[in-house]
Amino acid sequence: MEKGFLVLANGKKYEGTFFGAAGDTVGELVFTTGMTGCVESLTDPSYYGQIVIFTFPQFGNYGICDTDMESTGIHVRGVVVREFCPEPSNFRCDETVDEFLKRHNIVGIAGIDTRELTQMLRDDGVINAAITKYPDFDCSTLTSFRVEGSVEATSTKEPYTLTPTGEAKYNVVLMDYGAKKSIANNLVKRGCKVTVLPYSASAEDIMALNPDGIMLSNGPGDPADNVEVVKTLKKLFGKAPMFGICLGHQMMAIAAGAKTEKLKFGHRGANQPVKDLETGRVYITCQNHGYAVNADSLASIGAKLRYINVNDGTCEGVDYPELKAFSMQFHPEAHGGPRDCEGAFDRFISMMEVEKNASR
C-alpha cells in the first residue's frame, strides 16, 4: 500500500498508508467517537470541509450500506483511522469503505495513532491538517484554511416535495442548510407533506407555501456566517411553529438575539449525554457540531434553556414559548440504539395541531 502522511498546522507529522483515494487534501481536523455510523458520518453534510478521525480502532468492518446514507455524496475532506477493514462482514454490505471512498475520490489514511491525535485535540482544540503524499509538505500553508461557503455548497439547489402515504395531515417547509435525509423521513412518516427549500429562500417564499410548520435543518460551518439566513428567520418568528436542529438551532438562537461560540473540540459521535432540565431525564444522543449557543446570552431574550450537555454543561436545546419555536443541538432523527429522542418530532406535530385547531 502506498505511503501517506498526515501533517498538522502545528508541524506534527504522522506516517501511514493510503486507502480510498490516494492524494492531497486539506481540512479542519476533528474526531468522532461513535463505534458505528460509518456511512452516516461520511455522508453527513455537517462534516463539509473537515478531515475526520474515527476513534474506534477498526473502520469499515461492516462495510457501506447504501440505505444508511444521509445524502447523495460524501462531504468529509478526508478520513483518518487506526486500521481499516478491507473485507467487511455484513449481509447488508453493498461495497467496502475502500471502494466507496475511491468512487467519491476521498482520501483516507490508516495506520495513524488516533488515540494520541484525539488526546491532542482534546487538550489543544481542533486544528487544520493535510493528508498528503509528500513528507516535506509545508505546514505553514495550513494556517489560512477556513471552512467557508459550506451551507451554499451542501443545500439543495432547487425545491422539491416529499409526500406521505395517504392524505397529508400537515404541510411543512424544511429549510435545507445541509440537511440529513432522516429529518425529512421522520416528518413524512408522521403524515407531513414536506417541501424542501434552498437555504436562500426568502421569508416571503416560505410563507407563500402556507406552512403549518417550519423545520430548520442541520448543516456545516459557523452559524454566524449565515447573515441573510438569520435575517429571514427573524421575519418568520411567530408565523408558524418552528423546530430547529443543529445549525438550524444555532441560527434560530442568533435570530432571537442570542450568541454562539466555537467549541474547543466540538461534540461528534453517537454517545453524547444530554439532560432535559424540565424532566431531569438524560438521553444518549447523536451529535456533530463545532459551535454552540452561549447559554448565558439566552436570559436577556426571554428564551428558556431546556437541554444541557452532561459532559461540559453547554447548551443543547432551547424553548421559545412566546415565538412558538424550539430547537435542539443534538440530532433527534439519529440514533445508535433506542429512538427516545424522536419524541421531538411528535412535539413539533403537536404544536402544529394546536395551531390548526386554534384557526378553525
Image (tube, helix red, strand yellow):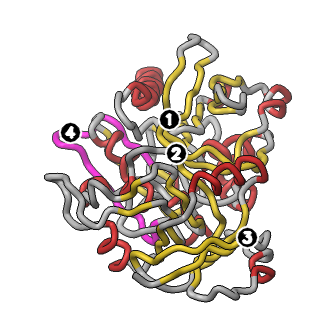
Q: Is residue 177 visible?
A: no
Q: Can you identify the residue that label 3 sits on?
A: 12
**Mark 1: few/some/many CA within 10 Å (<14, 14-19, 20+):** some
Q: Position of residue 97 (x, y in %)?
A: 33, 66
* Residue type, label 3: Lys
Q: Quadrant of residue 335?
A: top left
Main SS class of the magenta portion in the image: loop
Q: Position of residue 115 (x, y in %)?
A: 59, 51
Q: Can you identify the residue that label 2 sits on?
A: 33
- Number of numbered discs visible in the structure rendering: 4
Q: Residue at x 70, y 88 (%)?
A: 136
Q: Is residue 188 left or right of residue 57?
A: left
The residue positioned farthest toward the left in the image shown: 91
Q: Quadrant of the N terminus?
A: bottom left
Q: Residue at x 42, y 56 (%)?
A: 196
Q: Secondary structure at mark 2?
A: loop
* Residue type, label 1: Asn
**Mark 3: few/some/many CA within 10 Å (<14, 14-19, 20+):** few
